[in-house]
Amino acid sequence: MAVATKTIEMVRWSAIARLGDYDHSFYELKDIYKIHSDHEINDDWYVINDDYFQIELLEFENAKKVDFYILRTESDEGINLVFSDTDFSDGWFYTNENINMVINKHKILSGNSTFEPYFIIYTEITLENGDVIRTSKLPIYNK
């Protein structure tokens, strides 16, 4: 596949993964999340370069609870709650020392085919008044 074709395909899949996120563009995600892992941005995907993963939700100091969710885009498993945090004293962080265990990196399907480790992450924030806010989806690829 030509590089330009692959780039177009990756940008398209990122947009599809973020479908429904009308409030924020891909480039505004840096104002919502901070990734502390070794990463780069490529074709509208945050590419994590190792298995260590740490993401921080910015702001929302007065929230009661933050739930971090992951959805593998290539599967029909649905949404998985991976972490809940109820103490802002150290910030709203999700850390995983081996993120490929969450996303089953390059899982073998029937035959010898494998799928790529694309997923999205987002949070649901429970405010002090009980209202729940869902953040925009962050598309991630784990090399």
Image (tube, rainbow, N blue to C red):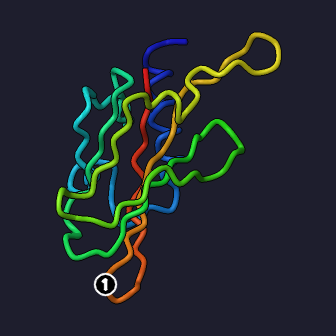
Residue kind at label 1, given as amino acid type? Glu
66 vs 118, nearest the viewer? 66
**Please, is residue 135 above or below residue 52 in the view?**
below
49 vs 119, left or right, is left
142 vs 27, left or right, is right
- Residue 69 is situated, as x and y percent measured from the top left of the image, at 49, 54
Which residue does the numbered mark 1 point to in the structure image?
128
- Residue 15 is situated, as x and y percent measured from the top left of the image, at 48, 46
Q: Residue at x 48, y 52 (%)?
A: 18
Q: Residue at x 22, y 37 (%)?
A: 36
100 vs 54, left or right, is right
**Please, is residue 116 above or below residue 33 in the view?**
above
45 vs 128, nearest the viewer? 128
Question: Number of callouts in the render?
Answer: 1
Quarter holding the C terminus is top left
Q: Residue pushed farthest bottom?
A: 129
Q: Residue at x 70, y 18 (%)?
A: 108
Quarter holding the N terminus is top right
106 vs 94, left or right, is right
- Residue 42 is situated, as x and y percent measured from the top left of the image, at 33, 28
- Residue 64 is situated, as x and y percent measured from the top left of the image, at 32, 75
**Please, is residue 51 above or below residue 58 in the view?**
above
**Please, is residue 64 above or below residue 81 in the view?**
below
120 vs 99, nearest the viewer? 99
Q: Quadrant of residue 55?
A: top left
How would you rate the neighbour count of disc 1 (Cα within 10 Å): few for under 14, some for 14-19, many for 20 or more?
A: few
83 vs 6, nearest the viewer? 83
Q: Quadrant of residue 112?
A: top right
Q: Quadrant of residue 135?
A: bottom left
| Secondary element type, mark 1 | loop
